[in-house]
Amino acid sequence: MPARDISALLAASGTGSAAHSEMDLADSDVIVGLHGTIAEQCDEDHLDDRSDADDDLNKGKIRFPKAKLYGRETELHQLLRVYEDVTVQSDGFHKEAAAPSSSGAVPSTGGSNRDLSQAEGDAPQTNVAKNNSSTRTRVIFLGGLSGTGKSALIAELISRVNKSESAHPHRLPLFGSGKFEQFENAAPFTALSDGLAMWTAQLLERAERKNDDGEEMRLLTKAIKKAGLTVTEEDGEILVNMFPALAPLLGAGDKEEGIGSDAAGPKPPRKASLRHMSLDITRLKIVVQNLIKALGRKQERPLVLFVDDLQWADETSLEIITSIVLNRTIQNFLFVGAYRSNEIEEDSPGSKRMADIEAGMVPGSVTKMEISGLKPKDIAKFCADCTDREVEDVDPLVDLVYKKTLGNIFFVQQALEELVRRNILYYDMICYEWQWNLDLSAEIEDFVSSDVVDMVKRKIGGLSEDCQRGLVLMAYSQKILKAVTLQALLDADGRDLDVFRTIKLMGEAASEGLLLPTDKDAEYTFAHDLIEQAAHSLVPEGSDRDDVFVLVANVLVERERVDNEDWMLFVAARHFNAVPRDRIESLDDLAALNLKTAKTAAAKASLSQAVELLRAAVSCLDEETCWKSFYEFSVDTYCRLAHIELALGNCDNAKEAIHTILRNATSQKDKAPAHLALVRLTGDTSNSDYIQAVKVGLDLLNGDYGQVAIPLHPSKMDIAKERARLKVAKKGRPLARLTERPAMRDDSIMRLFEEVQKQAFLCPNTEALNEYLVLRCLRVAYSDGICYEVAIVALNYAVFQMKKENMKMAFKFGNLATLIKERFPESHKGSDAAKFDFRELMLSAIRMPLGNNITRCHDLYRTALSHGLTEMAFASAMSGTYCHFGAGYPLNSLFGSKLMLYERTSGQMKQNGFNLIFKASRQFLLNMMGKAQGDPLVFKGVALDEETALKNLEGNALKMGLRDISAFRIALAVILDDEKTMIEMLERLKSYPLQDLSITRNLFRQSYAGMACLIVGTNTEHAEYLRLAKSIVKMFKAMNKAGMVSTVPLSVCLKALEKPSIDMYNEAIESCALAGLKQFEALMCERCGTMILEQGNEKGSFDYFSRAFFLYNDIGMIAKTNQLVTKHKFLADVSLKRPGTASVCSSSRAGWDTTASSFGV
């Protein structure tokens, strides 16, 4: 929304003056209902027309004014200012929004981390400078007692914005809302699901209108496809299974996967195995964030999400909401969270998450407001409007009502209705006006209770018996209920009502303001939480409440088979679990229900709910009966319980479940999940003493799995014997023929081999054990067949050999792993596939040219991030970054944007080590592009200040940070030919080992370090540097023999620097040109030109310097081209041949190929 439009709203809303409080909004296009309360009275029309005799029957009902604001202009003014701040922050979004308003309205503060005064006449603070932060998310926290009007305040905000933007449909905000439930009956993430459903409905409705010929929706569809969120993608399938309302938005049922398709409904979830039995919460957070980013990035409208009753929120939902709010890549987003101030504890999940959000947001991005009760004069205006009397006339009535309600507008409504029911407030049919009898003040005090729930219960008591019972049953099922479901509940309760009569009952409750119709046919919701609470409390605790629990649960179990709605399972399971066991008809069926519901919860990443349900399932039956009579059920339930307890860190509970399985399971296959869990549990609970986990795993292999004495510390003789046994098993066949073996019937032993190997990798001095495990695993595979886990074991061993610099073995087992993986595509999915692909990428960095890995690294970054594998994701991004630098790809702003994305995301996820690398990468990029703020050899710029960054590190983090920064700076020193900086960086780096787990990072560091050693060592005869250079040359030669293509030209370059000559430089130039390593080709040209110039052959050096110049320019190393022009004036003429030396010349290589003979290439 342009600032001038918002400012006009702000000016119109005023600051709470009497004139504005009187403002009648009846003719405006706003959400109807009393503003200042959450309840909306569906049958309330304007005050009576006294000449209408047909309306006499309704004269006795008090009617609350529609669409009229009472005493909330100050708060509304502040909300509008925050909303304006969201719209102004958008990139390229309504440039006129930045212009000052001509209406004279106060400027926006952009929100602030402070409590706002609610005193009338306290105008919003206007002397706060506008926040200049780049974040596009704003947060509002609304506190207040129940019934003070928090929800209605947000509804009025959206209503006014919609009215102001009605002439610009493409700028109307997307508004979604949801609320957490007091009685915890809902399925996981219902509040978030409701909000996303509202967004989807609005987008689909606007798509049908096609106000802009569908262009905006096409852009949104493109963004969703680019994010990999269509239903044909795994992430899209997760979203649809979690939030079914998203199906049409993500293309379900449409071949074009477009918005507005005729959705055939969500696909059924994939069948879960013990390997993939639950959705990782980290992955869910990332997938939801990606969806909101896609919605916000392509919309010229803010996204507004309002979540009510945070005091009842579960930890998992809050975790997702927090991750969304703190993601600074999400654009145009306003989050509003409301809570009951008197019901939220300081140590509650809601309070903690609000504190986390406030601490993690940019200062000025969070606004906190406390909504108190209305003032007596506002209540007086309200009462006057209700009774069509003058304000002065209603003072006695206001005195009574205000004393009891303290300005809580919902409470005021209930009090007035109670007075009407008691005939103290009545409509005089003779005088045609409202009158009251306040003579018996003592009795009136009793009539108007201080407990609003008590008054609502009296109001419900005035309804028909069927209607009362319907409200009670609705309170024990779900806040929002379809008439057909309520009819089934009433029918089970012995009330012979069809659906039409049930709808009529719901209409009766709606006419009394107790229910509200939703936007769906024959569906109603409670008008307020307190009404639901009152209906719920009508059933006393004990046997009566147990009867209701059982009745509702039985009906919902039956209805779920027809409606397929998850919430029915959760409500039914909770109700059955709440009653005494003697009230349950079949404990077997209850156990099955709990297991089914637990699977649904786990698939939705709600592990806390899942574990409660699984515990309830196993408690239904005693252990002996359970395992004897329901063996398959017991195996499934206990295996899932052990897995989830372990995932939640409940080690004692996990251990108990594991031992229960081991005591009762009758087959090796059924015990296998418990064996795996036991090994993992031992590793988690032994203070990171992973050798204990290895011992447990070996004991299992040697015992239950019949392996012959696998030693913990194999000797050379042990390994030699195992190698000989493997040779016999191979029968002369090459290792690659292993892929031809049949698939294993039971892969339990291979899974255990994999787990033991993984634990052994975490232990020191287990090289011999790792080799022995692989040899034994392969021998078993030759005997019993292969499976996906064999590929994992082989690949792990390949990485292990790579660490030992045994590249030949690394390639051999890496190839084997890839071939076996291709045999089992159905197993290569999810996080396991991402882990496999990452290790495969580590090997491909050796076997393939660096440039070939860049796209693959970025794709794996996205995949790993979507599965919650954050360290792996950023390691992939880091590898891609070093590949880009190493391959001599263009250094430009596009690459800088990718680095900024990595930097920002790693910072948000607290991956500080990777964050420093990406900052250093971007500063290296800026320095090379000629955008350094000062000396290009120093890291002191917009991306990284080396001194400040290192000052904040200590221990190993400081050591690694110093290594990574020094690697980039020595590259700068070599490229810019500064020997002083080379020596300084070599002094830092000489103590670090030559090997690094990241091949690409190590290749980058050692390439420039080796060159620096030879340059400085040759010039100064510094023996220490020459020895280091020889070690690097030796390492590169070993990599060359193993088949690493990128080290071949680098070895030639080092050789040329070690023994410089024109022939050696020409060989290095040719080798780098063939490999596409432009920056090293340029370096060799420059070094050769310098050598020829020093020999006095200025003309002979011209071609080398010119070629170096154009190559540097191709890459975008503008700092270097500027340096060359300064050193060699004749290059200025060359640069003038093309407009702008900063442009990337793609044709320079082709031009210089015609003069290749001058280089001997």
Image (cartoon, rainbow, N blue to C red):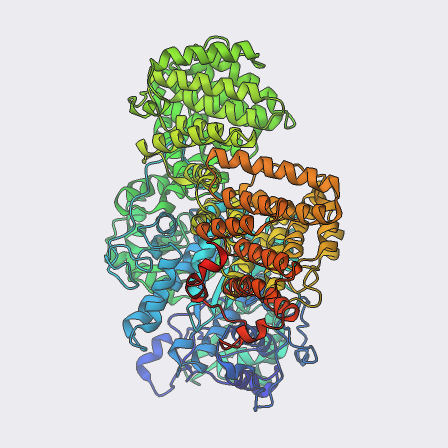
Residue 700, image x, y percentages: 49, 14
Q: Is residue 456 left or right of residue 743?
A: right
Does any portion of residue 191 appear in the rendered image? Answer: no
Q: Is residue 968 left or right of residue 854?
A: right
Q: Nearer the viewer, residue 231 or 1087?
A: 1087
Residue 1065, image x, y percentages: 55, 51
Image position of 940 with respect to 824: above or below: below
In which quarter of the view is residue 127 placed?
bottom right
Residue found at the far front of this picture: 1096
Task: Name which residue lies at 68% across and 45% down.
Answer: 1013
Residue 910, image x, y percentages: 61, 49
Q: Nearer the viewer, residue 362 or 639?
A: 362
Image position of 863 with respect to 172: above or below: above
Image position of 1015 with respect to 261: above or below: above
Q: Nearer the viewer, residue 169 or 299?
A: 299
Residue 486, image x, y percentages: 32, 51
Does any portion of residue 1075 appear in the rendered image? Answer: yes
Image position of 1090 with respect to 62: above or below: above
Q: Is residue 352 left or right of residue 528?
A: right
In which quarter of the view is residue 1021 placed?
top right
- Number of numbered tags placed on the structure image: 0
